[in-house]
Image (cartoon, rainbow, N blue to C red):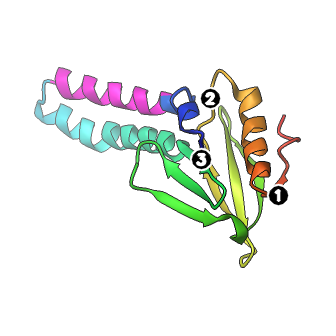
């Protein structure tokens, strides 16, 4: 079994989670909790912090590949686990999403019995982003999974 879990520990996706948690601790431990400050914190700041952390968590999926199945897991939400049998996968496509200040990279899995794919945003290594997707494609090809768009990612 080959796991890409180690690459998620150096992912840029950890930045929003860390910043959100630091901001939350700063507010919790340094607030005076007066009437107005408490209302401001819970109405304006806390939803922003939760959104910030959630965005980071969405990008922290990693894959484990073995000869029988492909397993998708989330680094933070460790109870999330999706398994695909190798023979049930039609192909896997590289997927990217651009925003104003960000770029998400992931994979889209197309099963043989569905036309619509399921997208998982992977937390690729910040240091080795150029070789990360080559390793993903190589491991998928080793177990006979067809890959698309992995060469057109830059």
**Dominant secondary structure (helix, strand or loop) of the stretch shown in magenta:** helix
Query: Which residue is label 1 attached to?
Result: 146
Residue at screen point 19% across, 31% down: 37
Q: How many marks?
A: 3
Residue at screen point 65% across, 31% down: 101
Which of disc 2 and disc 3 is earlier in sequence?
Answer: 3
Under circle 1, the secondary element is loop
Q: Is residue 125 left or right of residue 113?
A: left
- Residue 31 position by quadrant: top left
- CA gap between label 1 and label 3 equals 18 Å
Under circle 2, the secondary element is loop
Labels 3, 2: front one: 3
Labels 1, 2: front one: 1
What residue span does the magenta drawing correspond to? Answer: 15-31
Labels 1, 3: front one: 3
Query: Which residue is label 3 attached to?
Result: 1
Query: Which residue is label 2 attached to?
Result: 125
Of residues 63 and 35, the one drawn nearer to the viewer in this rendering? 63
The residue most toward the bottom is 113
């Amino acid at each position: 079994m080959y796991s890409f879990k180690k690459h998620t520990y150096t992912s840029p996706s950890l930045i929003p989670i860390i910043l959100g948690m630091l901001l939350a601790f700063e507010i919790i431990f340094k607030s005076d909790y007066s009437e107005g400050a408490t209302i401001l914190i819970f109405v304006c700041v806390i939803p922003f912090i939760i959104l910030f952390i959630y965005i980071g968590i969405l990008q922290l999926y990693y894959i484990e590949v073995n000869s029988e199945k492909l397993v998708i897991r989330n680094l933070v939400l460790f109870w999330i686990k999706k398994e695909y049998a190798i023979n049930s996968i039609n192909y896997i496509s590289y997927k990217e999403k651009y925003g104003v200040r960000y770029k998400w990279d992931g994979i889209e899995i197309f099963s043989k019995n569905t036309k619509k794919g399921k997208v998982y945003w992977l937390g690729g290594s910040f240091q080795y982003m150029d070789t990360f997707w080559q390793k993903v494609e190589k491991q998928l090809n080793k177990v006979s999974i067809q890959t698309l768009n992995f060469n057109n990612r830059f």
